[in-house]
Image (cartoon, rainbow, N blue to C red):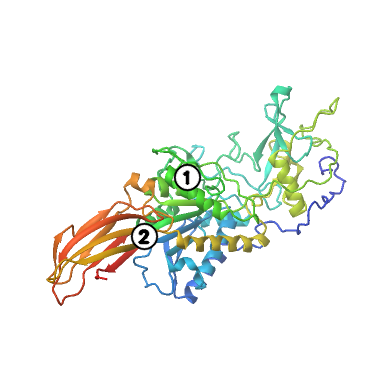
Amino acid sequence: MATPLQDPDAALESPPAVQEIPDYVIPPDGYNSPEAIAQELEDLAAAHANVSLIEIGQTNDAYPLRIASFIGADSNASAVGLPAILVVANLEGDRLATSEVALSLCRHLASGEAEILKRAQVFVMPVANPDAAMRAFRGDLPWRGAPTDNDRDGRVDEDGPFDLNDDGNILWMRVANPNGTLLIDEQDDRVSREADASASEAGVFELLREGSDLDGDRARMEDGLGGVKVEANFPHRWRQYAPEAGRFQLSEVESRALVDFVLMHPSIALAVVLDDEDNLAKPPSGGSSTDKNSTDPREDDAALLKILGKRFHDSDDFAKPRSAEHGSGNFADWLYFQRGILVLESALWSAPLDVDPPEESGAEDSGEGTGMEEAPAEEAEPARDLTDEHKLLIWADAWYRGAAFQDWQVFEHEKLGAVEIGGWHPLVLNNPPAELLPELGTHFNSFIDSLANDLPQLRWSVEVTALDNSGVFEARAFLVCDGLLPTMTAMGRATRKQMPIRVGLELPEGGELLVGRGQSAVERLDGLGDNSEFHWIYRIPARGDAARIRATSKTAGEALTVLEVK
């Protein structure tokens, strides 16, 4: 298919229909803006008694940071004694689909039909990085934060990418450079590939973000708006002196507010982070130990991720998403490695790599007049294997009729001369068309509901015997943990940041403990029936109330039973 650079007068042809796929619109069309999501949360809280909003801070752009709290209809106002689940979405800012799915969960929880609220309180933060999300929604780069001097020249935010050709998007530039490492691919001239030195190839251009050298220091687009990433500002594996990581750990209001919220809610037994990383599609194998640089969980916790990951991806309706590289200083790592909370991470969706290609057509040269022309080959080279970018372009041509990738167009740059501007539209590779969001939301809501039976649940199994007629009794009891999850993760045991289970014998007035301990603790119980045994001998008045035993866990709630002879 000819491009305007090859033949400016040639009309672009629509790609052949390769599958029966609707003609989707490009995100963010059909998506809610962060402001619209905030408004809907307010409407839910006003309309439903079991919904409340907690404001944990305010961003640099004056957007409120809000977490929606949901309790069951039968729960008391503060949900005392219930374990909690925390769902946080879109820390990167450009993962708009994760915010939509989290909003769908909020609607489901507010409806009163959610099974999970029978067993837990649920906290949901649909937009964890409103500044970046708002900019991404407008078509800008998802940068946020206070102005930073990234190039250390005494000025801040003076030289960032911008829309040179006024097409509404900040894309990429192919810039001719004899020291560049890239070539135009022979199979699809939209693809920029690395030159193969083993085949005596030399690169002829480099890729740069669309923009210019506004400050005249010969470094291009090195100091744009803001620049600190929330997802690089948390304590675990925080990178000192990395500009995007912030001046110090938790320097950003978004990261500090989230950490404070978690510390004030020790009942959080499980967290779900919806963003660019994923540990459910390909769960890690885990390790026997961890340290300050660890990225793999403990083996026992990894086994839980495998079980839950298999359940989450038990449907063939959506392909497993691809995870971004494991970043430093992210929220999920802090939750797990420093707080001991089990974290489920999902990227939710990735652009498919398995769409059937159209009929093959001959490749043509491109780049005329830009210094990036391909030399004519004397003999036809064997076709290269399709790269992921080739596959993504096949998908984009089928789903979006070619509109997801802007073909390279010549632009006369005031400082660089003739360049080509084009590339992927900013949101299409990580956010599905809006038509797919309802199904993604329904699937996620069902998964969250399924966790009700997985949360640790304490119960007592007791046997009480009267030793004589004077009110002396012997009680043997087992504290049992039902559900899949333990009361404390293997990592929680290592960090010692989570509270053990408190166990107490409660005697009526005039009662006396003869054998055993009135108060004790159990460090943790695994799920699926793990238990701990207790033994007491005690005396109670003849006409007094019966004794009781109570077990209390921050992450598993409370188990209370009356000691009666049966």
Identify which residue is drawn at 48% across, 44% down.
148
If the image is split into quadrants, where does the C terminus sit? bottom left
Identify which residue is drawn at 47% across, 38% down.
242
For residue 538, the mark is none
Task: From this view, report whether residue 400 is shown above or below residue 381.
Answer: below
If the image is split into quadrants, where does the N terminus sit? top right
Q: Earlier in the sequence, mark 1 or mark 2?
A: 1
Please name the residue that numbered disc 2 is placed on: 556
Please name the residue that numbered disc 1 is placed on: 232
Q: Along the line of sight, which residue is nearer the eye, 112 or 481? A: 481
Q: What amino acid type should be assigned to the residue bearing mark 1?
A: Ala
| Residue 363 drawn at (x, y percent) | 83, 37
What secondary structure is marked by label 1? helix
Q: In the picture provided, is 380 more to the left or to the right than 554?
A: right
- Looking at the image, can residue 207 be seen? yes
Count neighbours of disc 2 (C-alpha within 10 A) and say few if under 14, some if 14 to 19, many if 20 or more. many
Q: Looking at the image, which residue sits at the far front?
A: 468
| Residue 113 drawn at (x, y percent) | 51, 72
Identify which residue is drawn at 83% across, 50% down.
16
| Residue 20 drawn at (x, y percent) | 78, 57
Circles 1 and 2 in contact, beta carbons < 8 Å: no
Q: Along the line of sight, which residue is nearer the eye, 547 or 551? A: 547
Q: CA distance from mark 1 to mark 2?
A: 31 Å
| Residue 441 drawn at (x, y percent) | 59, 62
